[in-house]
Each structure stands twice: as C-alpha cells, then as structure tokens.
Image: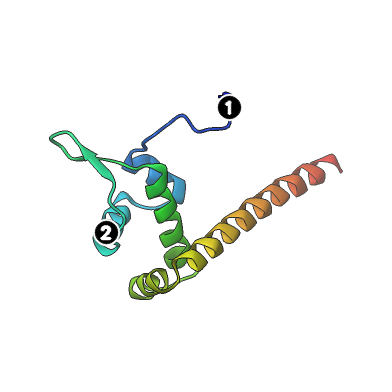
Amino acid sequence: MALNLNKNLKLYYSIREVAEMFDLNESTLRFWETEFPYLKPKTQGPNKVRQYSEKDIEQIRLIHNLVKVRGFKISAAKKIINQNRSGADMKAEVISRLITVRDDLQKLKHQLDGLQ
C-alpha cells in the first residue's frame, strides 16, 4: 500500500477550530447540534469536550451553506436536507469550490496589480 501524503493526519477537531473554519461562534455550532440530529460530534472526558470528525465538518459545511451563505432559515434548511440530501451536498460542494476559485482569483489580481 502506497503512502498517501495528501491525507489529513488530524482525526478530530475542537469546537474552536471548527468555528474558526466557518467564521462562526461556538454557540452557533452547539445550537446546530440541537437542531440537526445527524450532527453529533464525539464527546470525551468529564467535561464533554466535543471532537469533530471530517464527517461532522462536512455536515457543518452543508448546514453553513444553506443557512449562512444562501440565507435559508433553520426549518427550511432541515427540509431541504431531508428531501434532497445528495442534491444539497452537491450544491454545497460547488459553492465551496467557487468561493475558493474566487479567492484565488482575487489574490492573483492583487499580485498583478502590484506589478504595475
């Protein structure tokens, strides 16, 4: 078996790390956990420290896309996810890629403007 150098070596992320990834408050993530039953991070220790896996982060990415990016209310986001899970996942992925491309193009433009 070949060594996969692109694989993320971190298995779990803290609530603070996940909140920073999506520019959210930690309380927003806790609230989403109560509203979306399939979003259940692993908890460990007496303090119930949340540990988010890659799967949890994908769930959050989908919810974030629907609620924060596209402006749906929580109830509408739940309905969309329940009715068309794969379609919602695909749209979230496309939007995420488009945002990345936009950011890269803005950086490139900034670099080109610096050359003039």
Q: Secondary structure at mark 2?
A: helix
- The colouring scheme, among rainbow, by chain, secondary structure or one colour, is rainbow
Residue 34 visible here? yes
**Toward the viewer: 97 or 22?**
97
Residue type (three-letter) at the residue carrying disc 2: Phe
Q: Residue at x 41, y 74 (%)?
A: 83
Q: Quadrant of the N terminus?
A: top right
Q: Tell me whether circle 2 and circle 1 mark residues in contact (CB < 8 Å).
A: no
Considering every residue shown, the one lying at the far left of the view is 46
Residue type (three-letter) at the residue carrying disc 1: Leu
Crowding around mark 2 (Cα neighbors within 10 Å: few <14, some 14 to 19, many 20+) is few
Residue that badge 1 annotates: 5
Report whether 93 appears left or right of 24. Answer: right
Q: Residue at x 77, y 42 (%)?
A: 111
Where is residue 36 drawn, in percent x and y? 30, 62
Q: Secondary structure at mark 1?
A: loop
Q: Quadrant of the C terminus?
A: top right
Where is residue 113 drawn, in percent x and y? 80, 46
**Toward the viewer: 40 or 68?**
40
Between the C-alphas of marks 2 and 1, the distance is: 35 Å
Residue that badge 2 annotates: 31
Pointer 2 or 1: first along the chain: 1
Q: Residue at x 51, y 68 (%)?
A: 87
Where is residue 32 drawn, in percent x and y? 30, 59
Mark in the foreground, 2 or 1: 1
Where is residue 84 drawn, in percent x and y? 45, 71
Residue 69 visible here? no
Against 33, residue 91 (above or below) is below
Report whether 101 appears left or right of 18. Answer: right
Against 20, residue 30 (above or below) is below
Considering every residue shown, the one lying at the far front of the view is 1
